[in-house]
Image (cartoon, coloured by chain):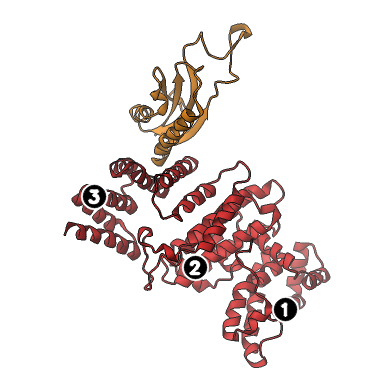
Chain colours: A red, B orange
Amino acid sequence: MAPVHSQEPLSAYHAMKEQELIPHLFRSEFRKITAVLSKIFGIAHLEIAEDIASETFLLAAESWPFKGIPENPVGWLYKVAKNKARNYLTRQQLFTDKVAIQIGNSVNEVNEELETEWSDQHINDSQLQMLFAICHPAISAEAQIGLALRILCGFGIDEIANAFLTAKETINKRLFRAKEKLRTEKVKIEFPAGAEINRRLTTVLTTLYLLFNEGYYSESQDAILREDFCLEAMRLTYMLIANEQTNLPAVNALLALMCFHSSRFEARKDSNGAIILYQDQNEELWNDELISKGVYFLNQASRGNEITKYHLEAGIAYWQTIKTETQEKWENVLHFYNQLLIIEYSPAAALNRAYVISKVNGNEAGITATEKLNLTDNHYYYMLLGELYKDINIQRAKDNFNKAFSLAKTETEKKIIQIQSSRLELDIE
Amino acid sequence: MKEFVLIFRHEDGSKIASPEQMQIWMKQTMDWLGGIAAQNKLVNQGNGLSFEDSRVVGHQGVVTNGPFGDIKETIGGYVIVKADSVDEAVEFAKNCPVLQGEGNTVEVRKIARADGFH
C-alpha cells in the first residue's frame, strides 16, 4: 500500500527553480524543523522553535538565488536550523538556563540532541507527539485546528485566516492564547501512556476530522488552499496509521472517509469555482485511485468490534461513490444513518436520514420524516422540504425554497438555493 | 423535557424467532430508533434482554427457569426517550416493532427523579 504522501527523491528538487522550491520545502520541512526543535526545547518554547524555523527559510530565500540551490536542500535546512538553535542557546544565557532547568537537561545535552535528532524516524515521532500535544483537551477545537495548520502543516497566518474567513488578527490572537495554554498546562511533547492514548486519540481524530471538513466545506474562494487542507488532514491521519501504536480501526475508518470524500474534488466545482451538486457531477471525474484506497482503509478499519462514527460515515461515503441508485444502496445508507444518529445526534445527519427515507420509501414518507424534525431555524431543513415537495406540490416547494433562501447565511448557499429553485420554474413552464 | 422508559413486554418469551425474522425485526427496530434519534429524543438505546439463560429468583430464594409459564409476560428490552409529555412518549411507543406481535405491549413509564417532586 503506497502511502498517501511519499517523500520525493532529492533529484526531484533540482527540476524546480528556487521560487517554487522554497515554498514547496516550506510546506514539507517547516513543520518537521518546528516539531524537532520544540521536542528538544519543550513546548513552552514553541514560538522560539517556530522563529528559528522561519529564520532558516528566510536565509534560504536570501542566499539560494545567489549561491544556487545546495546539493541537498533538506539537509541544508536542517543544518542551518541546528546552527541557529545552537547560536540561540549560546546567546541567550538566561533562556538557556531556563530551558535547561525546565527540561532537566544541561546545555551540552541539548546541543547533543540538536546534533543527533534528525533521523526520519525521530522527525516523524516528533510530529506525531506534537499532534497529541496540540490536541490537548484544555485547548478549544478551533484553536487546535489553527495550531495544527500552523505547526504541523506549515500554513501561513494569512492562509489560515483566509480559510476560516476571519481576520488575521483574530487568528494570531487565537494561536497566541492556545500556546499560552500549552505553556500553563505544561503539556509534554510525548506519546500519552498506554491506556491514555485511546482517550487522547479521540480528540486527535476529532481535530483531524474538523481540519478535513474545514477544507472540504470551506467557503473560501481559494480552491487550491481548500484542497491542501484536506490533503494535510489526510497526511496527518496517515502518519497515525503508519505508527504501530496508533494504527487503530477508528483511524483507518477516518482515512477511508477522507479518501472517499476527496475522490470527488475534481467533480464538485466548475471552472468558475461554483459548487456542482452531487446529482449533477460527472462521475468520470471521480478519482478511482482514492476510492480504492478508501476501500482498502475501510477494510483495515473493520478489524475488531468497535464501530465509531467514522466507520458509519465512511460506510455512507462508500455508497456515495456508487452513483447507480439501487434499493440496496439506499437501505444500507439508511441503516448507517440510523446507527450514526443513535451514537450521536446532529441536525445534518437527521436531515440526511430524512432524505434517504425519501429514496427508500418515496417522497411522501420523506416529507413526514423531515417535518418531524421541526428544524425551523435551519435552511437545509427548508431546502430538503423544497426538494421533496418538487413533484408533489410546486407551490409548497417554492415556499420552502424561499424560506431557505431567507435563512441562508452565505452567498454560496444562497446561490445553491437559487439554482434549485430556478429548476422548479423550468418544470412549471 | 422529561425522560420516559419504554419497556417492551412480550406475551410469550419462549417463542423463538427464525434468523430471517430476527433480521427483519432488527432492521425495523433500527429504523424506529433512528427516527427517535433523528428528533434528538433518544436518551439511551437500552438493551435487548435475551430469553436464554434467564431465571426468576422468588421469595426465600426459590429459583425458577426463566419468566415463562407462571408469569404471563416477559420483558424483552427497553429504551429511554425524551419527551415533552407522556402523550409524545406514547406516540413513539406506538411505532415500536415489538407491537407487531399479538399480545405484546410497550409500557411507558416516566423516570422518577430525585428532584423534590417525587
Mark 1 and mark 2 in contact (Cβ < 8 Å)?
no
Q: Which residue is mark 1?
A: A75
Q: Position of residue A53 (x, y in %)?
A: 65, 75
Q: In the image, B18: left or right of A197?
A: left
* Relative vertical location of residue A291 with respect to residue B64 in this rendering, above or below: below
Describe the element under mark 1 as helix, strand or loop: helix
Describe the element under mark 3 as helix, strand or loop: loop
- Which tag is nearer the camera, tag 3 or tag 2? 3
Image quarter of the C terminus of chain A: bottom left
Q: Chain of mark 2?
A: A
* Relative vertical location of residue A278 with respect to residue A114 in this rendering, above or below: above
Q: Position of residue A401 (x, y in %)?
A: 26, 55
Q: Position of residue A273 (x, y in %)?
A: 39, 71
Residue A151 or A282: which is nearer the viewer? Answer: A282
Residue B70 or A105: which is nearer the viewer? Answer: B70
User: Crowding at label 3, few (<14), some or many (≥20) Cα neighbours within 10 Å?
Assistant: few
Q: Which residue is mark 2?
A: A227
Taking the view exactly as shown, the residue that stands out farthest to the left is A429
Residue at 63% from the left image edge and 46% from the top image edge: A303
Q: State which quadrant residue A272 falls in.
A: bottom left
What amino acid type should be assigned to the residue bearing mark 3? Asp
Image quarter of the N terminus of chain A: bottom right
Q: Is residue B101 visible?
A: yes
Q: Which residue is mark 3?
A: A391
Q: Chain of mark 3?
A: A
- The disc, 2 or 1, on the residue closer to the chain's N-terminal end is 1
Residue A270 or A209: which is nearer the viewer? Answer: A270
Q: Position of residue B115 (x, y in %)?
A: 46, 28
- Which tag is nearer the camera, tag 3 or tag 1? 3
Distance of label 3 from label 2 (alpha carbons): 36 Å
- The disc, 3 or 2, on the residue closer to the chain's N-terminal end is 2
